[in-house]
Image: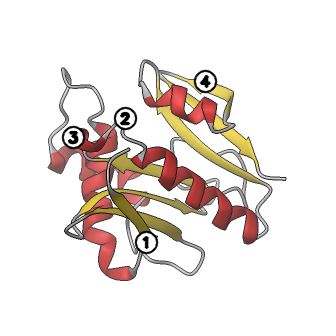
Amino acid sequence: MADFTIRPAVVSDGSFLADMVVEAANWRADAIRPRPAVLSDPVYRNYIAGWQRPADRGFVAVDEQERPIGAAWFRLLAADVPAHGFVAAGVPELIIGVRPVWRAQGVGRALIRALTDVARAAGYARLALSVEHGNFAEGLYRSEGFAVVASRGNRDTMVRLLG
């Protein structure tokens, strides 16, 4: 396994979380979405706007030189706020991004596990996320206990029970 550590995300990580939203949107090497297009999308913007609100929780993975290499966080969003993985009020939506060179090295799994533990400790019963069809990360999500509960367009909404 690669050498990295996980630390809690803080207010000053907002810019890096925006980078990770762009990475998440660009999981497919043959269909790159430019940063301005991703960050102007209302759904992606909702995942980072105003970070860090009181209910926001997250983690950042850093390499041996303390450079950020990935992040996972969750937000509570209302039913009338555009989101890809909304399932119900009070169910946080997980967002995750990992720099391409660090993918498939355990970073995403470590981030998901840390975030799942925090969500459970905070008393949440479920954690939701959205994944585009064909995204290789879906296998990771399934292996971490997420199951598809809905499909819309080219996306699946997945939920993990935390009980």
Contact between labelled residues 2 and 3, with CB atoms less than 8 Å apart: no
Picture coordinates of residue 63, whole percent (x, y): 26, 61
Instruction: Name the residue at 85% across, 53% down.
Output: 163
Label ID, residue 151:
4
Q: Give the residue number, with chain letter if any, for mark 3.
A: 101
* Mark 2: amino acid: Ala
Q: Is residue 82 visible from the viewing direction of this image?
A: no
- Judged left or right of residue 1, residue 88 is right
* Mark 4: amino acid: Ser
Label ID, residue 104:
2
Colouring scheme applied when the structure was drawn: secondary structure
Label ID, residue 34:
none
Contact between labelled residues 4 and 1, with CB atoms less than 8 Å apart: no
Q: Is residue 7 visible from the viewing direction of this image?
A: yes
Is 2 located above or below residue 123 in the figure? above
Label whose residue precedes the other's in the sequence (1 or 4): 1
Contact between labelled residues 3 and 4, with CB atoms less than 8 Å apart: no
Contact between labelled residues 2 and 4, with CB atoms less than 8 Å apart: no
* Mark 1 and mark 3: Cα distance apart in space: 20 Å
Are there few (<14), some (14-19), or many (20+) residues within 10 Å of tag 4? some
